[in-house]
Amino acid sequence: MDEMAFAMSGQTLSEKILSIASQKEVHAGEFVMADIDGAMIHDITGPLAVKGFYEIAGRDARVWDPAKIVLLFDHQVPADSLKAAENHIMLRKFAQEQGILNYDIFCGVCHQVMPEKGHVLPGQIILGTDSHTCTYGALGAFATGVGSTDMSSVFATGKLWFMVPKTLQIMIEGRLPSRVTSKDAVLKIIGDIGADGANYLACEFLGEAATRMSIPERMTVSNMAIEMGAKAGIFETDETTIKYLEGRVKDSAAIREGIVRTDEDAAFTRKSWNVSDLEPQIALPHNVDNVLPISQVPETKLDQVFLGSCTNGRFEDLLLASQMMKGEPVAKGVRMIVVPASREEYMKCLHAGLIEKFMEAGAMFESACCGPCMGGSFGLLGAGERCLSTSNRNFVGRQGSPQAFVYLCSPATAGASAITGYITDPREI
């Protein structure tokens, strides 16, 4: 890892986006009131945002722009408790009254549905009441999570205060080896930087390996920017971005209108990683930055493998895991739960025959939702159990019992480990 510091006069990508949104030139450290391009709430955080909005604006108030607000149900779907069912009823009523788009149940995880349905464009400011909203930075947007109370204010005004973040350029150089993925790259970076090493920074992901990543791979990296404390995790918009968005947005001309790039004379810090010799990485319990290369991880018997989440629940992830399984059955004594990130990704798996392959192997293939990631609905771990997960967090109690153990990995490692019953290097399969 190499580090360089720059102190000049241009603007970074994030500074330019916030300048446009606040209608004045701004730089890191300044406070701005910015116009918001899009806002998202889901079934867990949405009720408090709605309650706060009515307290701020009054029971008969209207949101600032219903066309810029999206509601999704993904954390507790179908409703797994009476409280969840009541929340769903309240949010459906709010969406209907306000004219807000509501994807309701079975559409998928918010961070997958928002980009694939065309609700994110380069250069926009997108807020969500979920910390992994930074996922949308894969498309060149300044996207970040906010609290439900902040979202209440956004609903009322369409604006929010920001301190313009400093920028950390993360150069991902070289080429990822076979069976080593963008998840391994970002785990390595988080392990080196630390859980608070990028606090309130805008992380820009650049370099040969970053540029070669597909949008699904970029979404994995941007998704986990928050795990090193970042305010946002952004990739520059390129032809890969444009190709992904074409056909997903109504106004194709708008795709290029928001493209901005960091000036060469902007003020930023740069750190570099070369991933050409990178091996699969594992985040051990109970912190995301507790990362080791798989060759240094002791042989660890597993009780459950979770393949899915907003981090690694896309078709490409599930296909890779299936390829590592090579038609072999899930190991005896291991539960494998597979959850695609959206209905669209589910249908890709269906048409490709992946569902049949996972089912024949003994895995459970579930409808699109957050699933075991946040310890809700199903797939909870009991005391002493160990789960290998492609999700983004492994905190104490995250997936069930506080006496359980969660290890984070790539889809390739998950697939290989599912058939052996212990944490296994996918390069050895």
Image: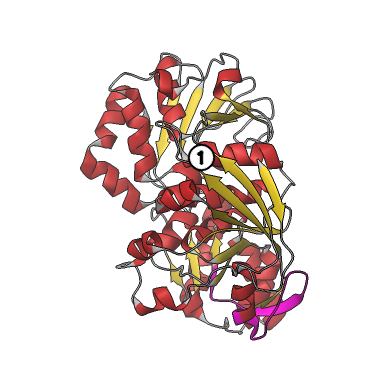
Q: Can residue 375 be seen in this view?
A: no
Name the quadrant of the N terminus: top right
Query: Which x, y percent locates residue 412?
Result: 42, 31
Name the quadrant of the C terminus: top left
Query: Which x, y percent locates residue 195?
Result: 71, 43
Query: Which x, y percent locates residue 154?
Result: 64, 75
Res 397 → quadrant: top right
> For mark 1, what is the residue?
183
Q: Residue at the location (40% across, 62% down)? A: 241
Total of numbered circles in the picture?
A: 1
Instruction: Determine the secondary structure under disc 1.
Output: helix
Question: Pointer 1: residues within 10 angstroms few (<14), some, or many (20+)?
Answer: many
Q: Is residue 31 left or right of residue 185?
A: right
Task: Decide which of 175, 43 is in the foreground and name it.
Answer: 175
Would residue 36 be counted in the magenta stretch?
Answer: yes
* Highlighted range, magenta: 20-39
Res 297 → quadrant: top right
Q: Can residue 157 be seen in this view?
A: yes
Task: Decide which of 325, 240 is in the foreground and name it.
Answer: 240
